[in-house]
Amino acid sequence: MITPTKGIAPDRCLLAIGAQILLQLEEPRSVSQAWSRLKAWRSEHAHTSPVSFGWFVLALDVLYSMGAIELDQDVLVARSTHAAPLER
């Protein structure tokens, strides 16, 4: 479910949906805005397999548990993806 399996196509696994959501969060957005933008993005890029709102929410849960997004005053915000500097 999180990664592709025999029953879940690569474009429907939660990590792929999560990556697509992150592409929509170049600026903070409400959950509704992110959902609308994701549907439009998938349509524009010929991803024809359906993604329900429930699946979208599960992908948000995965992103939140990984620390990739946070909810700040009812707005989704992508967290910084900069790696920690190497210590010597």
Image (tube, rainbow, N blue to C red):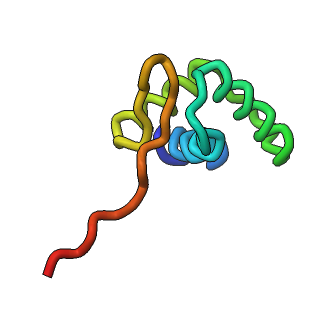
> Which image quarter is the C terminus in?
bottom left
| Residue 36 found in image quarter | top right
Q: Is residue 11 above or below residue 51?
A: below
Which residue is nearer to you in this view: 22 or 16?
Answer: 22
Is residue 6 in view from this perspective? Answer: no
Q: Residue at x 82, y 48 (%)?
A: 45
Q: Residue at x 42, y 25 (%)?
A: 72
| Residue 34 found in image quarter | top right
- Which residue is outermost to the left? 88
Taking 11 as reference, is 86 left or right?
left
**x and y percentages locating residue 65 in the rendered image:** 34, 35
**x and y percentages locating residue 15 in the rendered image:** 51, 45
Q: Residue at x 35, y 41 (%)?
A: 67
**x and y percentages locating residue 46 in the rendered image:** 84, 45
Which residue is nearer to you in this view: 33 or 49?
Answer: 33
Q: Is residue 25 above or below residue 81?
A: above
Q: Is residue 85 above or below residue 6?
A: below
Q: Residue at x 35, y 42 (%)?
A: 66
Taking 73 as reference, is 21 left or right?
right
Is residue 86 in view from this perspective? Answer: yes
| Residue 25 found in image quarter | top right
- Which residue is outermost to the bottom? 88
Tell me how many marks there are. 0
Taking 66 as reference, is 37 left or right?
right
**x and y percentages locating residue 7 in the rendered image:** 59, 39
